[in-house]
Image (cartoon, rainbow, N blue to C red):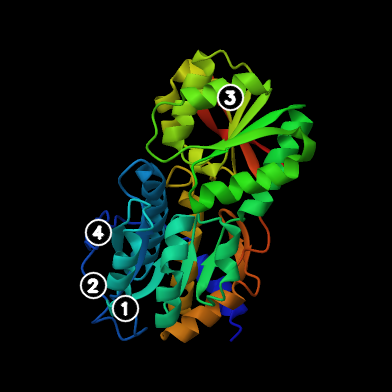
Amino acid sequence: MIRSSRARRAAITLAATALVLSACGSDGDDKSNDAAGGDGGGASELCGKNLAFLGALTGDAGALGQNMVGGIELALKEYNADNADCKINLKTFDSQGNPDKAPALATQIVNDDTIFGLIGPGFSGESLATGKTFFEKGLPSISPSATNVTITQQGWTTWHRVIGNDNAQGQADAAYLTGEVGAKKVFVVDDGQDYSKGLADTVKEALGDALVADDQISVGDTNMSAIVQAVKASGADAFFYGGYYTEAGLLAKQLRQGGFKGTFMSGDGSEDPNFVKVAGTQAAEGAVLSAPAGPPPADFGASGLYATQAYDAANIFLAAVQDGASSAQEINEFIGSYSNDGVSGPIAFDENGDIKESKIYAYFVKDGKLDVENPQAIS
């Protein structure tokens, strides 16, 4: 079903001035406003029901999920202010980004008949661990942040993402290092997770002869001395890490302490102010952190990486509600045919659920902080 004209009208409505919606909880807690759509004239069968978020809200990468929830809350706040007779609420499920914990939460979500759509999962590993569950139950989902290339190769027709995949980011990162930086020898490390390895593998392939060596750590490692020694022995003039901000910060800190003076670069899993906190301002200075996400508008009401993508994902579901979609199939068809400009950029999906257009940006640590307002477009 093509509903483009009605979707555009819905998008205009969604930009209305906001009132306050209470914050969300975790592990399935529903702390949003009480359902207010039951007496609102029956505009939609979904009045008073819930969107769900599945992702890390606590743990080593919890800040990234909190950014996403901030974007979802903003979208709901705006929508509910304009649709008091048909409010939509939020339930959150804290996986800590763990693909072992996520399946049980996915089962809770698909067995909750108040939930009509999922924003998430947040990370690639948990997406691969839960995608079949959501697909078999027909629950439409839009991830703001899961970038592993293979997710959209599984045939899960209910799964979509509003962010570019690791192929796009990894190729741009490698080109930046060999072109802009002029690196001749790049050492690449990842933490073995689906997102991390997928991104690092793309970087390694794209580097070609500029790849001097590679290695792997484990999530939770704190002693990076073996990596530091290997990097020094390789003569690398640049270092790339595929993983999240905690280990990235420790690597940057210990590499600098060990005398490494080359360029330190990582991907979107590290593009968070917590990277600077872990590394320390001196070791973090000059680091380059890429992301398939540009900065939010100056007056945007949520902050942090993935907030704009999560806001856009929520607004797609809300546009489907306003368009009259009620069944999972109708909502999924609406998402598949959606085409509009979001705050994160143009949004339209290909037949696999990938976003058709995504730019890659480099963010820089400067003067002791991550500059989130002035990135450089690198693709």
Please name the residue that numbered disc 1 is placed on.
47
Graded by Cα atoms within 10 Å as few (under 14), some (14 to 19) or many (20 or more), the crowding at tag 1 reads many
Graded by Cα atoms within 10 Å as few (under 14), some (14 to 19) or many (20 or more), the crowding at tag 4 reads some
Rounded to the nearest angstrom, the CA distance separating label 2 from label 3 is 57 Å
Please name the residue that numbered disc 4 is placed on.
27
Graded by Cα atoms within 10 Å as few (under 14), some (14 to 19) or many (20 or more), the crowding at tag 2 reads some
Along the line of sight, the residue nearer the viewer: 233 or 202:
233
**Looking at the rendered structure, which numbered label has been put on residue 345?**
none
Rounded to the nearest angstrom, the CA distance separating label 1 from label 3 is 58 Å
x and y percentages locating residue 244 in the rendered image: 46, 40
Please name the residue that numbered disc 3 is placed on.
230
Rounded to the nearest angstrom, the CA distance separating label 2 from label 1 is 8 Å
Quadrant the C terminus occupies: top right
User: Which mark is nearer the camera, 4 or 1?
Assistant: 4
What residue is shown at x 58% (from left), y 76% (from top)?
336
Kindly check if marks 2 and 1 are in contact, taking CB atoms under 8 A apart as contact: yes
Taking the image as drawn, is residue 94 in sight?
A: yes
